Amino acid sequence: MNITVIGLGYLGTTHAVAMAQLGHDVIGIEPNAARVADLEAGRLPFYEPGLQDALTAAIGSARLSFATAHGESSKTAAVHFLCVGTPQSSDSNKADTSYLYSAVEALIPVLSTDAVIAGKSTVPVGTAAELAEHASKLAGHPVHLAWNPEFLREGTALQDSLAPDRIVLGVTDEHSENVLREFYAPITATGTPLLTTDLPTAELVKVAANSFLATKISFINAVAEVAEAAGADAVRLAEAIGLDERIGSKFLRNGVGYGGGCLPKDVRAFIARAEDLGVSSAADFLHDVEAINARRRERVVTLAQQTLGGVSGKRILILGAAFKPDTDDLRESAALDIAKQLDDLGAKVVVHDPMALPALVRQHPQWAGDQDVFAAASGAELVILATEWRQYRELDPFELGTKVGAKNLIDGRNLLDIARWQSAGWHVDALGRNIKNG
């Protein structure tokens, strides 16, 4: 099919590249001329494993092109995917849907009567129906609008696009369903389940899924607080309860908590929408989810103060800037939250990251360390592991110990072989583990 993908941020760029790889002819629409120029030159504006090569191949196949605005070619598109951002509003927890309305208003002049508008952005429930009504008034006739939520995970986004766990279609008419079923046929043919729902159900799927994942993370972190007080080991505890097939082990690792551009924003938006709908008590538990998440970062700062007898004037290396490995995304990063808290207490904070240092230099240059982790560690009196990069798991504690000023470590992700680090002379703390140091 001929399609457009409107909005070339993380979601839109990945979706456009993946759909071109499946054989569709894709026009990416993005008003940011500099971003379009970068993409046309084959340069990604962010890091995502495998996506750079896929972008180059898609451009080379002539199945993917870019534009700053809709042109004649948009008139032949069978589907227009809305992938614009819905960030948290500056003055509340609500999602800002203004970019969606702007995107639809720009689309209407080139929208054919048979074309389907498919929203992929994460929105408050009820947005799709309001958007369909707005678009229909502008067009002068009913438009075909469906909601097709995305389920990408940063670090595996391309694979998640090509072989997702499920495809969800919120539709109100048979034509939209048929077009989108045909569009996704290359994926469903391999066994991926496709579920059709009404619009509000499709809108709720993504935000409900993310709220559940955030809850699961905060549950095990709450258990870790109890484990610390009781002298138990939360890592072994999580392993034991994760073997129950009703619970499962994924997202059941205690540490410094969740972050990124989705879970925090979606939890807050879910709370706000429940309040708007008059059912705020249904989402009350999510306030506790957020509070637990914040406490784990505070716990690391407390451990740092206890280890060093106060952090003012002390050089502290934080391993990790991105909110998770295999991305350079700094949004809602636990590592940077910890860095700020320590900085506010007078510590000399240095942050290292294998991929996110360029982004860190743009946003927080005062914390950016050397690209070489051993150089960044020079003179540090405490090392805090805050992002679970493979490179950190493979660090040699003996070699790193020759660079630091004092061998103190807080493993905020329970990633490392504690016994190995202790054998190299390190004093080690880890969340929820009550480690004994000699």
Image (tube, helix red, strand yellow):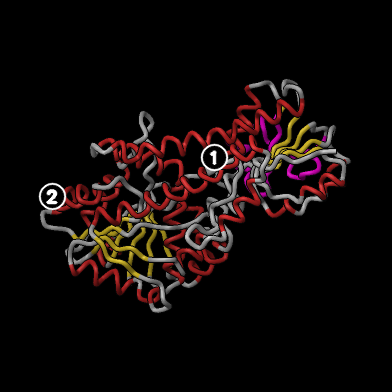
**Where residue 61 appears, x then y in whole percent?**
48, 72
Residue at position x 46%, y 39% from top?
Answer: 289
List the single residue furthest toward the left: 140
Residue 366 lies within the magenta run = yes
Q: Is residue 357 visible?
A: no
**Where residue 244 appears, x then y in whole percent?**
53, 60
The disc, 1 or 2, on the residue closer to the chain's N-terminal end is 2
Residue placed under numbered mark 2 in the picture: 137
Residue at position x 83%, y 32% from top?
Answer: 379
Identity, as a three-letter code, of the amino acid under mark 1? Ala
Q: Is residue 180 visible?
A: yes
Left or right: 390 as drawn, with respect to 217:
right
Left or right: 305 as drawn, with respect to 174:
right
Residue at position x 55%, y 33% from top?
Answer: 295
Which circle marks residue 222 in the picture?
1
Residues marked 1 and 2 touching at CB (< 8 Å):
no
